Image (tube, rainbow, N blue to C red):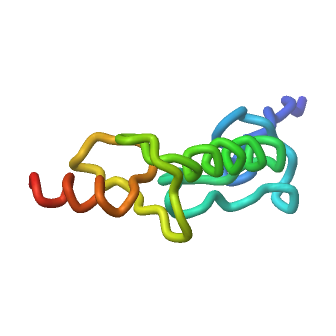
Amino acid sequence: MKKPVAKKTNSDDMCIACGDEPGGLNLWRPKKEWELKGWLCEPCFDEWEKSDNELKKNCIVCNAKLGFMPRRAKKVWNLKGYLCKNCWNLQDSKT
């Protein structure tokens, strides 16, 4: 008598944010600066991109409006977001 085989879930076919299994063709690779390992479904990708765009609007230290080139905070600074040129130089000079 044959036993039913449970479906094996491949972690490559799942969204790392919500755990949904939309299939390999409907998954999106996260942007490098998000520091995520795996794939995202389209709704989760859109959500991450929207929150990332919100972070790029203002400096997280002085709340100044960011210009053309926002600078990403280094990992050792323990800041999440983007900095203006002056705050980035100030943080860099502290280390």
Work out whether 16 lies above or below 23.
above
Q: Measured from the top left, where is residue 35 in percent x and y?
A: 48, 53
Quadrant assignment, res 61: top left
Quarter of the figure that contains the N terminus:
top right
**What is the total number of numbered labels drawn onto the structure image?**
0
Name the residue furthest right. 1
Quadrant assignment, res 20: top right
Report the residue at 60% width, 53% height from top: 38
Report the residue at 65% width, 42% height from top: 51
Name the residue furthest bottom. 68
Name the residue furthest front. 64
Work out whether 88 lies above or below 54.
below
Report the residue at 44% width, 47% height from top: 59
Q: Measured from the top left, where is residue 60 in percent x and y?
A: 42, 41
Front position in the image: 11 or 76: 76
Front position in the image: 15 or 34: 34
Quarter of the figure that contains the C terminus:
bottom left
Front position in the image: 8 or 27: 27
Q: Measured from the top left, where is residue 22 in percent x and y?
A: 86, 46
Quadrant assignment, res 24: bottom right
Drawn side of residue 25 relative to residue 90, left or right = right
